[in-house]
Amino acid sequence: MARTLLRAPGRAADPGPTERGNRELPTGERLPAARCLNRCATQAMHALGLLLLCSAYLQGGYHKLRDFNGAIAEMQHFGLEPAAPMAAAVIVLELGAAGMVLGGWHRWLGAMALAAFTLLASFVANRFWAVEPAARFMVENAFFEHLGLAGGLLLVAWHDLRERHGR
């Protein structure tokens, strides 16, 4: 009764699509925003998002592979010894785990490996608390950007595990 009194004159008793919400509508009758979302949320967008998320690892692994001596020097710069095996392990991790994420083979495991690597590397390479104040902003910014990247990878792992277990 209260809904009838509050309804604008000339309005039908059955609420329209905007009042019912998208969940109750058949797929063909969804609102324009939902149709747009369905068009945008495609496999191509998913693949592009994963590619962008993995791009730093693909680029880093590729450049370390091309300039292995530079990769060794980087490991030595951060005090990681033995430098050559560490550099090789980082290359395998960056390229292999990124390939797992992009290819979908144990995507959750590849994403977790990259997230753990990113967190560890941030604490090794972006120790903003130990940098002189003049350079602190850039290092601190890089540290928190890497935390965000690790968070995105954790979400990829979570989503993949949920999808595998049907939840």
Image: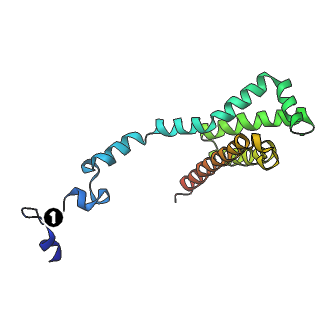
Corner quadrant of residue 93: top right
Q: Name which residue type carries label 1.
A: Asp
Residue pictured at 68% horizontal, 49% vertical: 112
Quadrant of res 94: top right
* Residue at numbered disc 1: 14
Side of 10 relative to 115 (left or right): left
Q: Farthest left residue? A: 10
Residue 7, horizontal then vertical, whole percent: 14, 67
Check disc 1 and report its element: helix, strand or loop: loop
Q: How many callouts does the rendering have?
A: 1
Pick the front one: 66 or 8: 8
Residue occupying the point 82% across, 29% down:
71
Q: Residue furthest top?
A: 66
Position of the N terminus, as image quadrant, is: bottom left
With respect to residue 77, does 19 lie above or below? below
Q: Position of residue 126 (x, y in %)?
A: 76, 43
Q: Is residue 110 visible?
A: no
Q: Nearer the viewer, residue 62 or 129?
A: 129
- Asked where in the image residue 15 lies, by quadrant, the reply is bottom left
Q: Viewed as shown, does residue 67 lie left or right of 104?
A: right
